[in-house]
Amino acid sequence: MPWNVDNSVDQILNEYRARQHWERREYQAAREHAAAAAEKALTSEDAVGYWRMSLLLAECQLELGLMQEFAVSARELAEHPAIQSDPRMLARAKALYSRALGILGQVGESLVLAQEVAALGGGDTDDGIGEMEMLHSLVAALAESGEIAEAWKYALDMARLADEGSDAETAGKAYWAVGNVAFLADNPEAGVRYHSLAAENLAPGNDVNTWALFNKGSALVRLAAGIADVETLECIERAELANSVTGGAPFSSLRFQWHGRTGCFSPERPRNQPRGWMRFLSIEVYCRITLSPRSNMLQPLLCTSWGGMMRHWPRLPILKKYS
């Protein structure tokens, strides 16, 4: 496909409206305008415009919970002839498709694609988003595959990128994901450190839903690791406050768990804390599921389910180490 740029009024308006609705979190309207803009760009043989709007279309589908549609859009973009000759566009598209496969539980295929993206160089852009997106896809796929040491190596690369000057929201989501890998690697000290960095960068004024989910998620992994300190209580309180704004379901179970652990009757183990292997399994199940990306780029998906839990239950060698 020739490299043209569609500067027609209709195309410019569709892209502008799609971006405006996205910024306002009006995802259905953004999806409709992005779809129209992607189709118009393809008709006009504007490969860059098609790639840009197809990425936005898929992100809107993800935000709306349309997982199958998200996967289809990501696959179509990754396999489209229009972008095959450009490593940057191809890498971003494959990273998106890797995310989709990971969310749908196709772990092996997700990991293969993430490794291909890494080989392509991550589709890096001036703002580092391409590399960050690639690293998140790779870390999530590796963690889901049980390759925790390898996931941790790439997670530290994510932290380095965040340290080097990503915008606050991107950095916050990166630190959140890195902290989850640390908890999964049975390194709660590092997990707490990176979650504290995430809290410093994520702002409730930018996205109160993300703020609520982060604080809830951080409290969950802290409690699962047996950490019932003041900072854990602060996470619970922030989650409750944000949740009261969004009108979500109450987090009373977190309060119950915190009080159960601080009401300690034994110096060896706080009250109600699971025994060794049970504690690790709860951390493992939570972190593997929450590493799946959602929301723009790096927000972990909080979708604990029996399906996800049972998928990891057969990994019984863990029991020997933590019993």
Image (cartoon, rainbow, N blue to C red):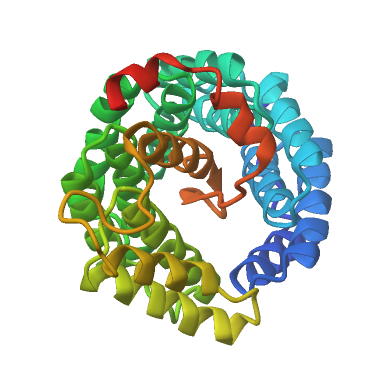
Front-most of residues 297 and 4: 297
Image quarter in which the N terminus is found: top right
Query: Which residue is depicted at the point 37% across and 31% down?
Result: 277
Question: What is the number of callouts on the image?
Answer: 0
Q: Residue at x 18, y 49 (%)?
A: 268
Relative to residue 302, is residue 88 depicted above or below? above
Q: Residue 156's quadrant in the figure?
A: top left
Q: Position of residue 140 (x, y in %)?
A: 46, 32
The location of residue 101, given as percent across then percent down, is 64, 27
Q: Is residue 322 left or right of residue 309?
A: left
Can residue 147 be seen? no
Residue 170 placement (x, y as % from top left): 38, 56
Give the answer, above or below, for where 78 lies relative to 230: above
Apparent side of residue 164 relative to residue 120 in the rendered image (left or right)? left
Along the viewing direction, whichever of 33 and 227 lies nearer the viewer: 227
259, above or below 197, in the image:
below
Judge from the rendering whether residue 1 lies leftward or rightward of residue 231; answer left or right: right
Above or below residue 284? Residue 108 is above
Name the residue located 39 percent from the left edge and 30 percent from the top edge.
Answer: 139
Q: Is residue 222 visible?
A: yes
Point out the residue furthest to the front here.
Answer: 265
Q: Position of residue 128 (x, y in %)?
A: 34, 44
Q: Quadrant of the C terminus?
A: top left
